[in-house]
Image (cartoon, rainbow, N blue to C red):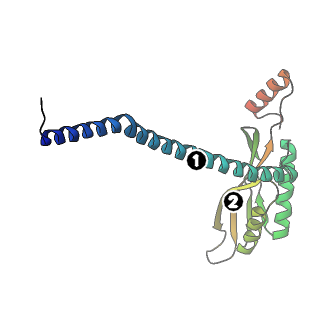
Amino acid sequence: MVYTQREKKIAIAVMALLGAWVLYSVVVGPYLDRRAQIEKDLQFVQADIDKSDALQRKQQRLLVVWKAMNSNGLQSDAGEAQKQIAHTLEDWRTQTGLTIETMPTPQDHAQGKFRVMTLNPTYVGSQAMLAQMLWRMETASIPLRLEKIQINPRAKEGFDDLKIVMTISTLSRIPAATGSNDRAANATADATGAGL
């Protein structure tokens, strides 16, 4: 069978299109799909690396804070922590001129590997005295957190005579148990609040 010039051109065009389609389906399409997947995977891996780097930087910063807390007064005994915070608050109260109205017995509870001791002192004084006390708390080297503060006028409004009720907390480490009997005793002490 003899093909005309036109039929030959059409056959060549169809073969070229069929070859291009096969080439795209077998080689180019999978290559582009795989390349897009690799780019997505690289972005995911880069995000993981960035998170890991940020976590490592945060760990280094917190390690410095942890060492400072340990060297500046994080106690391993709840009784010592109570003495430390009571002594510190009394020093600050004396330095600022605040008058103590009440100092209820501290309450404590275990939180992870720490014992959190909460104090609720009530002071009387002026705004300037309160500002000095708050500055001392903010710049304290011992582990201390002002959880809550309530400020009310003690006399008539307009006078600089305030009643200040604070909720202050501090930390102490819970000693690691060395034996099974010690662990049982610590668990009992934690459950009952005894041993402090």
Identify which residue is drawn at 13% across, 39% down. 7
Q: Could you classify mark 1 by the number of other residues whose Cα lies within 10 Å: few (under 14), some (14-19), or many (20 or more)?
A: few
Screen quadrant of the C terminus = top right
Q: Nearer the viewer, residue 173 or 68?
A: 68
Disc 2 vs disc 1: which is toward the camera? 1
User: Residue shown at 69%/65% (left/top)?
Assistant: 163
Name the secondary structure under disc 2: strand
Q: Is residue 67 visible?
A: yes
Q: Is residue 123 left or right of residue 41?
A: right
* Residue at mark 1: 46
**Amino acid tagged 1:** Gln
The image quarter containing residue 6 is top left
Q: Amino acid at mark 2?
A: Val
Marks 2 and 1, how far apart at CA? 50 Å
Looking at marks 2 and 1 on the same chain, the residue that comes earlier in the sequence is marked by 1
Q: Nearer the viewer, residue 58 or 16?
A: 16
Residue 13 horizontal/vertical position (percent): 21, 42
Hey, which residue is sitting farthest bottom in the picture?
158
Q: Which residue is mark 2?
A: 165
Answer above or below: position of 58 versus 178: below
Give the farthest residue toward the front.
2
Drawn side of residue 16 relative to residue 125, left or right: left
Badge 2 vs badge 1, beta-carbon distance below 8 Å: no
Q: Position of residue 178 (x, y in %)?
A: 86, 27
